[in-house]
Every structure is written in C-alpha cells, then in structure tokens.
Amino acid sequence: AQTVTQSQPEMSVQEAETVTLSCTYDTSENNYYLFWYKQPPSRQMILVIRQEAYKQQNATENRFSVNFQKAAKSFSLKISDSQLGDTAMYFCASTDSWGKFQFGAGTQVVVTP
Amino acid sequence: DGGITQSPKYLFRKEGQNVTLSCEQNLNHDAMYWYRQDPGQGLRLIYYSQIVNDFQKGDIAEGYSVSREKKESFPLTVTSAQKNPTAFYLCASRFSGSTYEQYFGPGTRLTVT
C-alpha cells in the first residue's frame, strides 16, 4: 500500500520569491514514480514534474525543481521566481507498478503581488 | 485535438436516482481512472481499468459502478447506494507502464439534492 502525506495545507509567497512544498511518502515498491500536479482555480489537473525513483538526479522543469531524498522518502517541490499564475492547489502523488496512483491532500499556494 | 472529455460539466440529480458520468479519451491510452474530490481534500480513487473489459476497485468503490467496453470510454455510474454523492469527479487516463503520468479531464461537478 502507498501513502502520501502533505503536511502544509496552505503556503503564501510573494511574487518573484521562492516557496518549497513538502511531501513524504511510503511504499513497499522498489520501482515507483513520483509526481507533482497543479490544480488552478479552473480545477484542471496539470502535471508539473515527475521523478523516477531509481534516478538520483533531481528533476527540474523551468522554475520547478524537486528535492528527492529516497532514504527519507521525501519529495519536496521548489517553485522559484513565483508568478501570480502559480496560485493553485499542488498535489504530490506516487504510483506503483500496477498503475495505481495515490495522491496527497494537497497544499494551497497563494502568490501575492 | 487529443484529450479527455467529461460531460456534462455540471450535473444535478434528485436523491435516489442513479446517474452516469461520461469520460472519453482519444489519446489511445490503455488505462483509465475515476477520482472523487471533496472540498479541501485530495483525490480519492474510485475505480481504474488497465485494459478493456477489466477494472479494479479503488479505495472508495462502494456505491459506484463502471464499465470498460471500449478503449476510449470509461463511464462511471453513481448509484443510489452512494450515501454522499455530491462531489467533483475527475477522470484520467495514461499509457500502461509505471513511467507514465496521468492526463486528466476537466471534471464533472455532481450535485444531488
């Protein structure tokens, strides 16, 4: 069974600043994948970034990067140079080898001018 | 344009009635998923299907039913046995294989009174 925990219900950040969202997970799988999804007010789920567990190198996508600590089962997301359009709910997720996804409860990010 | 469609966007039903939510994809994805999202909460898995004519229960399958007669379609029926059906429902699909992320539809907001 998989569990994903996001302990920060809401984070506020000013434009151009950096914010880091935390995520911890637990899984019995040896091969698994981790994802961050964004859900803006439109409620459309959008993939932000993904990480293969067997890769030590942290994934990056433009202003978004992760800090993947496999031993600690931690998968945090850093948003650099925050923009107003980054305001959204952010979900951490894991998937097992059967294709079953587990999502965290989400962190609401509010970017202020 | 390739994508996932869910219809309708808003759906209203009287208590005691069954209702079917539509989900269609033209991405040639093998796997399809249904999630429920309640206010301030993450996504909870209702059912998923890896191939045609086969599907598995997720974490909250009680009161729901699905079918997968075609690769492109994965309708969800919310039955009268579901005690709290009012929620936002998201459909997703992906290629089989654990490396692949899910793509999401725009969602259906179901209100039962």
Image (cartoon, coloured by chain):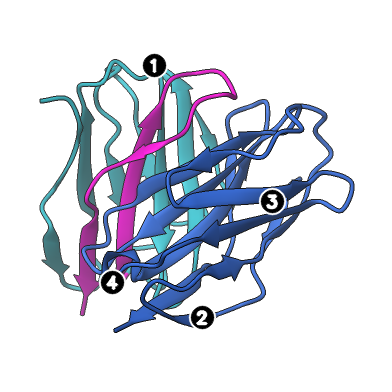
**Residue hosting label 3:** A67
Q: Do the residues indicated by labels 1 and 4 lie within the same chain of the protein?
A: no
On what subunit does the disc labeled 4 rest? A
Residue at the (30%, 32%) spot, across then down: B74
Q: CA distance from mark 3 to mark 1?
A: 37 Å
- Kindly identify the amino acid type of the residue bearing the numbered disc 2: Met
Where disc 3 sits, the SS reads: strand
Kindly tell me whether residue A30 is visible in this rendering: yes
**Residue hosting label 1:** B52
**Residue hosting label 2:** A11
Q: Do the residues indicated by labels 3 and 1 lie within the same chain of the protein?
A: no
Q: CA distance from mark 2 to mark 4?
A: 13 Å
Mark 2 or mark 3, which is nearer the start of the sequence? 2
Who's cyan, chain-wise? B
Q: Quadrant of the N terminus of chain B?
A: top left
Q: CA distance from mark 3 to mark 2?
A: 18 Å
Where disc 4 sits, the SS reads: helix
Residue at the (35%, 20%) spot, across then down: B29
Who's blue, chain-wise? A
On what subunit does the disc labeled 1 rest? B
Q: Is residue A3 left or right of residue B105?
A: right
- Circle 2 crowding by C-alpha within 10 Å: few under 14, some 14–19, many from 20: some
Q: Is residue A27 above or below residue B19?
A: above
Residue range corresponding to the magenta coloring? B86-113
On what subunit does the disc labeled 3 rest? A
Percent across and percent down for residue B31 are 43, 25
- Give residue A8's mark: none
- Kindly identify the amino acid type of the residue bearing the numbered disc 3: Asn
Q: Nearer the viewer, mark 3 or mark 1?
A: 3
Percent across and percent down for residue B27 are 26, 21
